[in-house]
Image (cartoon, rainbow, N blue to C red):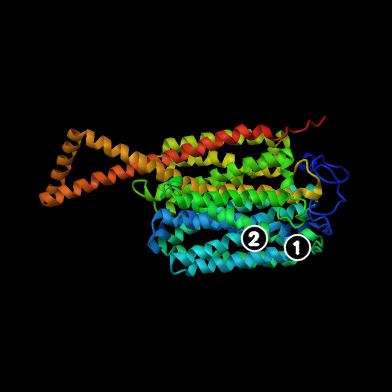
Amino acid sequence: MQYDESAWLFPNFTNMVHPFLPPTGTTGATDAFATTTPPTPLVDGKQTGLVAGLGLAAWMEFYTFDAVNLVLPDMAGAFGVSHEEASWLLIAFSASLFWGMAISVWLAGHIGYLRYILGSIVLFAIASLGCAFATDFGTMLVWRTVSGIAGAGLAMWWRGSVYLLMPRPRRSVSMMRISIMIYLSTAAGLLFSGYVTDRYTWRWLFVPNIVVAVAAIWLLIRHFPKIVRPTDVRARGIDAPGLLLLAVALVCTQVVMSRGQAKDWFGSSEIRVLAWAATSALVLFVGWQLHHRNSVRLHRLDLLRHRDVAAAVVLGVLAGVIVSGSTYALPEFLRTVYSPGLDATHTGRILCVYALTAAAIRPLVTRSVGKFGPRKVLAFAFILLTVSMSLMSYLITTTTPYGYFALPLILYAFCLSPVLSALASGTVARLPQGVQLDAVAVYMTFRQFGMSLGVTLVTGVLAWREQLHSSRLFDFLYSASVQVNEWMTSATLMLMQRGMSATQARSAAEALLAETAIRQARTLAYADAFVFMASVGVLALCFVPLMSPTPSKG
């Protein structure tokens, strides 16, 4: 008998009035896009084609995300910027993706669902070409920002379309198939980008997006059903104050998080002003979204009164921090600090272990969520995540064989796949059909907020801990002057035996000592970064009980 988790996951709430939500016939700002005409049920062929089209659309965004993470050191070298400056390519992408995610449901209802998805695909393909042909860092930053805005439609609407279009018994199966495609896209991105970067140029990694975009557009035009656009005030209006406040909060927050370390945090008047502006804009945005006079709100933040939605949002933010932080930190360590530094090909091969493992176990996750419920699955997953990040921290040395990182990456996959599935399922498990799409939008937006903070927080932790470890190491070297002098003498003599003059050998020995100390400080900083992410996992575990327990089937 085929398993179907939707029997409990999507109960029939059609005629039920939820204690936190208005009755399903009401209109106004608190309604979801209730006037959307339900699509005609899809036949099996249409469902298969639609799932394939949505999966290919999502493929583009997830493929590019990990591929760019992998080759970031090569991009930094090509544009002549530091690794910290190059991380802005990730921060700009994640920040614009968050902003795009926040407006995706409204924009899709405003211009039409299929039109929005197709437009996002085309824009992402154009941005990919822009990245491939970018001649300077500023241009590349602009195209990565455009990619993030377009990627929001791809990342949000593969899931949103399943909730909107698929019959209830087919949703879990459809999500599982698309999730597997997404994990495979990550593996493909890591393998292909590593190969072409080492043998040709990193610019080639963006080319497959054009082929995938053409295939996705063809499938979606053929198989996406016609849906009458909603005509209510919220869908047809524009929340201009909300858009402006959200943009101000996002930009100011990103600048504070990325520049705070360099500017002595709140010791700088610039950081204080930006932090005040970000906080004020965020408070005003939340208040405006909840205000009864706002009939065109971007988000149904009133859904946060529901226990499961609030829990999914908190856990989604924390999970987002870990996902983006870890996928940035490990390839950076292996390629820039690890001795000898790995090339993109070998780094991609070891990193794809987590993506392939996640794809392999995804069918089991669907069964597990249905059998045990989101709360138990989340608790198990966050425990594994903490173990994975702790083990990663333990293995972060310059001499650890790189194959050893496969084990924590496998454990990471056993966390990643259940967390993302259980959070999305738990968000809507007890909500009426009419607001499930809004609830998913709230969850996805906050999860992306966490991902946009992840790289920023990790780069801040790395800079702070590297400075701390550097000062401690050099203090130790000065205090242990006898041992240092003995080492310097030995190294100088060895270099002189290789043909250097005494002066050259002494200078080379000093440079070697400084390089070794700096590498050790950076290694300790990366180990601390994974301790930080393990701590976030422990914090997330503390919030798992917020999720409602699974109702007994008796």
> Height in image: 543 above or below 53?
above
Residue at image location 16% in from the left, 38% down from the top? 485
* Mark-to-mark CA distance, 1 and 2: 27 Å
If the image is split into quadrants, where does the N terminus sit? top right
If the image is split into quadrants, where does the C terminus sit? top right
Residue type (three-letter) at the residue carrying disc 1: Gly
**Residue 333 percent location from the top left of the image:** 41, 47
Q: Earlier in the sequence, mark 1 or mark 2?
A: 2
Q: Is residue 183 visible?
A: yes
Query: Within the image, what quadrant is residue 98 found in?
Result: bottom right
* Numbered disc in front, either 1 or 2: 1
Mark 2 lies on residue: 57
Q: Nearer the viewer, residue 259 or 359?
A: 259
Q: Residues within 10 Å of mark 2 (few under 14, many from 20)?
A: many
Of all residues, the one furthest to the left in this rendering is 502
Mark 1 lies on residue: 237
Q: Nearer the viewer, residue 369 or 450?
A: 450
- Give the SS element for disc 1: loop
**Residue 527 percent location from the top left of the image:** 42, 39
Residue type (three-letter) at the residue carrying disc 2: Ala
Query: Within the image, what quadrant is residue 424 found in?
Result: top right
Q: Is residue 3 visible?
A: no
Left or right: where 416 falls relative to 482: right
Q: Are marks 1 and 2 in contact (CB under 8 Å)?
A: no
Q: Nearer the viewer, residue 314 or 225?
A: 314
